[in-house]
Amino acid sequence: MPGTFVLSLDTELAWGSFDKRLGPELVRAAEWENREGIPRLLEVLCRYRLSATWAFVGHATLDHCSGHPELEPVNYEWYSGDWFQHDPASEESRHPEWYARSCFLKVLRAPYPQEIAFHSFSHVIFGHPGTSRRRAKQEFAKCREIAQEFGIRGDVFVFPRNRVGFLNELREAEFRAYRSPDVARFRTRHDKINKALGVLADFFGFTPLPVAPHLDHGLVGLPGSLMLRAMDGWRRLIPLRSRRARIMKGIDRCIREGAIFHLWLHPINLYYQQQAIFELLEECFYRVSLLRDRGDLCVATMGETAQRYRTSHEPATKMVCAAV
């Protein structure tokens, strides 16, 4: 049985971190992601005939906006004011750092099929008590409206910052799969220690763990194997050879074990050290395409992986769904 390569992309523009570090650097990176990063990444994927799961922040796909007073406020200790106070309530030609309808359409109509998923509507944190059940349902509903507008399934979800929450509501909104938190070789009860262990794994090029789908609240959860970090700040100290080693080791292991290697990244982070990071991705995608053509590796989206899991576990899936 061949291994499976899955790639998911958290496509966010400025929505991904405006609550943490809104400033000129984020605006420049988000505008670059729209104008250059997404089109370039899409071109490379299509050239190697690879499908990926593009998880868009729903608001970034709008062609215009005049505000969202209907959405219930959120309350986070690190952020004060209305969640939309920095949103220019405009459109892409004036604010490409917040709106990317053109990129959304390019992915939707790509010459080689890509999967459209959602990364929430406005990047609220679902696993935080400051996000109410009502706001979560509103976010899910907004994403479903966009999917219906374009006649796509759009039923795969990636939680902002991997903070999972409101899975019952996600299922009720007719989503069928989500990305669950990354698997880790070592995990403690302390988030800071876990993050430090993850950084050490990156520095020393440890082999990522393969992952397997699982059923949770009637949804298929697919963990990540490895996040490709940005090459800015302290992260640029992670050797490029270690980054390459982790990806290649992950691919090799999933082939040996007939398992899944799930790589994920933020296209906005390709803004940093662009030549080096794109060369790394080109090398990775080229190898994946060779292994696929040789029959050693399957390439699948998150949605395809979830569907295969449901098909192979159909009797058990029906029983669990009926009990939820």
Image (tube, rainbow, N blue to C red):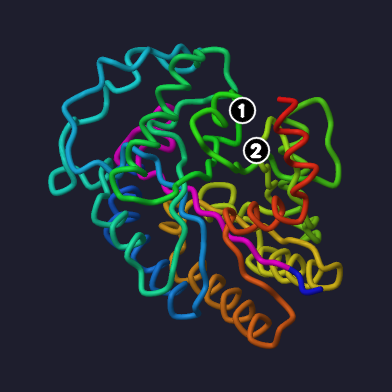
Most distant residue in the bottom direction: 294
Q: Earlier in the sequence, mark 1 or mark 2?
A: 1
- Above or below, 168 against 102 in this view is above
Q: From the image, which quarter does the N terminus lie in?
A: bottom right
Residue name at image x 60 percent, y 43 percent: 177
Residue name at image x 58 percent, y 47 percent: 234
Q: Secondary structure at mark 2?
A: strand
Residue 240, percent across and down? 63, 66
Chain part drawn in magenta: 4-24
Residue name at image x 40 percent, y 67 percent: 42
Q: Residues within 10 Å of mark 1 (few under 14, many from 20)?
A: some
Q: Are marks 1 and 2 in contact (CB under 8 Å)?
A: yes
Q: Which mark, by number, is residue 219?
A: 2
Q: How many marks?
A: 2
Residue 243, percent across and down? 66, 63
Q: Residues within 10 Å of mark 2 (few under 14, many from 20)?
A: many
Mark 1 = which residue? 167
